[in-house]
Amino acid sequence: MIDELERKILNTLNKNARMSFRQAAEEVGISATTLYHKVKKLEKSGVLKGYIPLIDKECVGYDLTAIIALRVKQEKDVEVQEAISKLPQVRAVYEVTGEWDLILICYFKGRKDLTYFLKQKLPLSYVERAITHLVLNVVKEEKRTPLI
């Protein structure tokens, strides 16, 4: 678990991970040296996994988002998860309860890209059933982890 000071640091970095340690320390109300050591501790412990840019997927050509639900042959579930996880179009793989085994969040450059993915890339011999939902409009897509 993280302490209250670490929570404040993470909230500050969540707002703007590009700010300097000096600026972040000022906002949190601690010295830059203390902030530096706390951030290094958070990185080393795996709480803080990295710093990535948030790229608008449509600006780089990914105009189509699909949510794909899969039912997988149970004896092949780990194999399918590993294979699917390597596909660049797949941005998230969730193992879920209920009627479906896996939920995929995928980005595509268009319908042809999606069709090729569904017909050629998915390990279909181990997939018993698939259903694809096309996202019409994104109402909310928050990348930051809430620290409540």
Image (cartoon, rainbow, N blue to C red):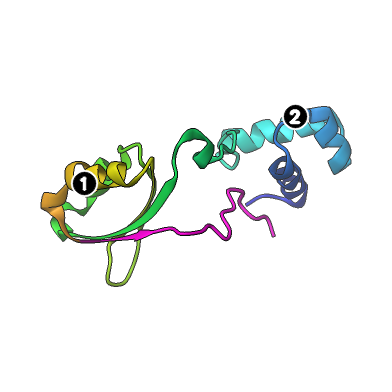
Q: Is residue 107 above or below residue 52?
A: below
Q: Amino acid at mark 2?
A: Tyr
Tell which of 147 and 41 is nearer to you.
Answer: 147
Mark 2 touches mark 1? (CB < 8 Å): no
User: Visible in this render: residue 76?
Assistant: yes
Q: Is residue 126 above or below residue 23?
A: below
Q: Amino acid at mark 1?
A: Leu
Q: Report whether 12 appears left or right of 106.
A: right
At x 32%, y 47%, the residue is: 111
Q: CA distance from mark 2 to mark 1?
A: 44 Å
Secondary structure of the magenta portion, mostly? loop
At x 58%, y 48%, the residue is: 143
Q: Residues within 10 Å of mark 2 (few under 14, many from 20)?
A: some
Residue 134 highlighted magenta (yes or no): yes
Instruction: Point out residue 88 in the picture as x, y percentages from the top left corner.
Output: 35, 36
According to the picture, the residue beneath numbered tag 2 turns out to be 36
According to the picture, the residue beneath numbered tag 1 turns out to be 122
Residue numbers of the magenta segment: 130-148
At x 15%, y 59%, the residue is: 73
Tell which of 133 and 11 is nearer to you.
Answer: 133
Instruction: Point out residue 93 in the picture as x, y percentages from the top left corner.
Output: 36, 51
Q: Is residue 96 above or below residue 24?
A: below
Instruction: Point out residue 37 in the picture as x, y percentages from the top left corner.
Output: 73, 30
Helix, strand or loop status at disc 1: loop
Q: Quadrant of residue 82?
A: top left
Dot placed on the residue nearer the N-terminal end, 2 or 1: 2
Helix, strand or loop status at disc 2: helix
Residue 30 highlighted magenta (yes or no): no
